[in-house]
Amino acid sequence: MRIDVLTTFPEMFATSPPAALGVSIPGRAAALGVVNVVATDIRAYAENKHQKTDDRPFGGGPGMVMMCQPLWDAVHAVEAMDPAPATRVLLSPQGERLTQSHVEELARQPRLLLIAGHYEGIDERVIESLAPREVSIGDYVLSGGELAAMVLIDAVARLLPGVLGDEGSSGQDSFGEYAVPVSKKATETRRLLDCPHYTKPREWMGRGVPEVLLSGDHGRIEAWRLEQRLARTRARRPDMLPPG
Ligand code: 9D3
C-alpha cells in the first residue's frame, strides 16, 4: 500500500531507524515493502515566490490559515504519481473519531493520501473541493496533524497482509469480539479490554501469579481470561459494553 502524506514537516515521516515509522511493526512493514510511506512538502507546490503555504485569516483572529492553491496542487500532483486511486484523509480536530473499524476499512484501500498540517485551520473552500474523509484521533489538542497521521499509519500498517507473523496477535480472530448493530445496515465490531498477563518469576516481591494460570487446564485458563476481560471492561470502559 502506498501512503502519501502531505505536510510541511516531511522529515517527521522517515521510515529508517530510529524514526517512529522505521522501527517495530511499521518499520518491518516499510522494510518488507508492504507499505510505502511517501511524504511530500506542501511548500514545494506553493506558486508564490516565497513558497508561502498559509496566510492571515479573513475576519481576523489568531494563527494562520492554509491557502487553497498549494494544497490543491500538491494533492493533484501527488495523486498523478501513481495510477492507484487514493482515499483522501484529512487529519483534523473536526474529524470523525478514529476507531478500529475505520482503521480496518482504510487498510482495505489500495492507496491512502493523508493531509496533515501545522496551522490554525485550512481554507474551507479547498476542503470542500477535495472532499477528504476527516479523521480525529481523540479529544485533545495536538500541535499539528502529523502525529495523528503517524498513529493512523501505525494502526493501518499492522493490519496489512504479511506484516504480523501468524501469531494472531492482531486480535483479528481472538475471542471476546462481537458485532453490535449501529444502524439498519451497519454493524460495529466491539472488543473487550485485555486480561492481565504474567511471566517468570512465579513469585516477585511477595506477589504470586493467579493459580489457574499454573494449572495447565486450558479450558479453565481461557474461561478465567474471558471473565477478567469482561470484568475489566465493565469497570474501566463501560462504554464498550452494551447498555444494561
Ligand atoms: C488551539 C487551536 N484550536 C482552536 C480551537 C484549533 C486547532 C487547530 C489545529 C487545534 C489543533 C490543531 C492541530 N491538530 C490537528 O491538526 C489534529 C488533531 C488534534 O489536535 N487532536 C486530535 N486529532 C487530531 S487530527 C489532527
Image (cartoon, helix red, strand yellow):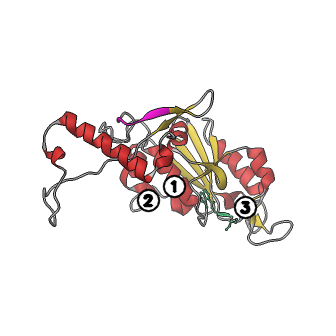
**In the structure shown, which secondary structural element does the residue marked by tag 3 occupy?**
strand
Q: Is residue 175 rendered magenta in the image?
A: yes
> Bounds of the magenta span?
174-179
Mark 2 or mark 3, which is nearer the start of the sequence? 2
Which three-letter amino acid code belongs to the residue tagged 3? Gly
Residue 148 vs residue 191, the one in the foreground: 191
Say if 206 sits above or below 222 in the image.
below
Q: Is residue 216 rendered magenta in the image?
A: no
In the rendering, at what x and y percent does residue 85 appear? Answer: 63, 36
In the rendering, at what x and y percent does residue 35 appear? Answer: 47, 44
- From the image, tell me which residue sits under label 1: 150
Left or right position of 166 against 12: left
**In the structure shown, which secondary structural element does the residue marked by tag 2 occupy?**
helix
Kindly report the distance in space between the C-alpha atoms of the residues bearing marks 1 and 2: 8 Å
Which three-letter amino acid code belongs to the residue tagged 1? Met
**In the structure shown, which secondary structural element does the residue marked by tag 1 occupy?**
helix
- From the image, tell me which residue sits under label 3: 121
Left or right position of 88 against 153: right
Q: Does the residue labelled 3 lie within 8 Å of ligand 1?
A: yes
Q: Residue 9 has which mark? A: none
